Amino acid sequence: MPGAILRCRCGERDIDSIVSQVLGRVAVKAANLLRGKEKTVFTPHVDTGDFVIVVNADKVRVTGKKEEQKTFMNFSGYVGGHKSENVRARRARHPELLIERAVRGMIPHNRLGRSVYRKLKVYRGDTHPHAAQQPAPVKLR
């Protein structure tokens, strides 16, 4: 399985290849599945979404010069505790954070958003511990 988005719908998960897909498109699809926006029973204040598992997070691509120019900044709270890294360094160190951070920005920043975000699982390689749920495909555009 090259790269995947998996979705849990009443106990089953769906998969599709995300290899060489653009980061934003993968994040939008994952956020919509997490919120349940593609369901007929979608209600904005109720968590009707599915579990989403993204596999091969290190194979997702970014467009333009973002690989070198986009920076992620952290501050530890201590004097001189500012750290920054670009997409290339973050992909080498922890590629799951690229997708997790993009999806987190697309869901609500409140209690509902936190419960939705807990249902997102992102894995670096093409293996995941959810094989018992028998994944099936989800189409990305």
Image (spheres, rainbow, N blue to C red):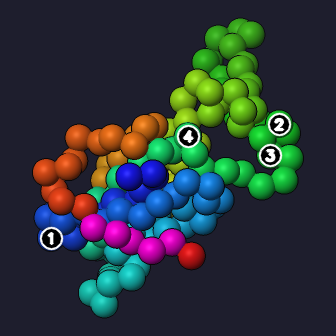
Q: Amino acid at mark 2?
A: Glu
- The residue to which callout 1 is attached is 10
Q: Which residue is mark 3?
A: 66
At x 62% / y 55%, what residue is drawn?
A: 20
Q: Residue at x 22, y 70 (%)?
A: 9
Judged by depth in the image, the label closer to the viewer, 1 or 4, is 4
Give the residue drawn at x 50%, y 39%.
Answer: 96
Q: Could you tell me if the residues under marks 2 and 1 are in contact, i.e. CB atoms within 8 Å?
A: no
Marks 2 and 3 close (CB-CB < 8 Å): yes
In the picture, measured across the screen, residue 111 lies left or right of residue 107, that is left
Q: Nearer the viewer, residue 132 or 7?
A: 132
Q: CA distance from mark 1 to mark 4?
A: 28 Å
Of labels 2 and 1, earlier in sequence is: 1
> Among all residues in the image, which is located at the extreme top?
79
Label 4 environment density (alpha carbons within 10 Å; few <14, some 14–19, many ≥20): many
Residue 59: percent from left, percent from top: 57, 45
Which residue bears the numbered disc 2? 68
Numbered disc in front, either 4 or 3: 4
Q: Residue at x 69, y 13 (%)?
A: 81
The span from disc 2 to disc 3 (Cα, nearest Å) is 5 Å
Q: Position of residue 84 (x, y in %)?
A: 74, 25
**Where in the figure is residue 91, as x and y percent of width and height?**
62, 33
Say what amino acid the circle numbered 4 marks: Asp
Q: Which label sits on residue 58?
A: 4
Proximity of marks 4 and 2: CB atoms separated by less than 8 Å: no
Quick one: 17 or 90, which is closer to the camera? Answer: 17
Between circles 4 and 2, the one closer to the viewer is 4
Dot 3 amino acid type? Lys
Q: Secondary structure at mark 3?
A: helix
* Label whose residue precedes the other's in the sequence (3 or 1): 1
Pointer 2: residues within 10 angstroms few (<14), some, or many (20+)? Answer: few
Farthest residue to the front: give it.
Answer: 1
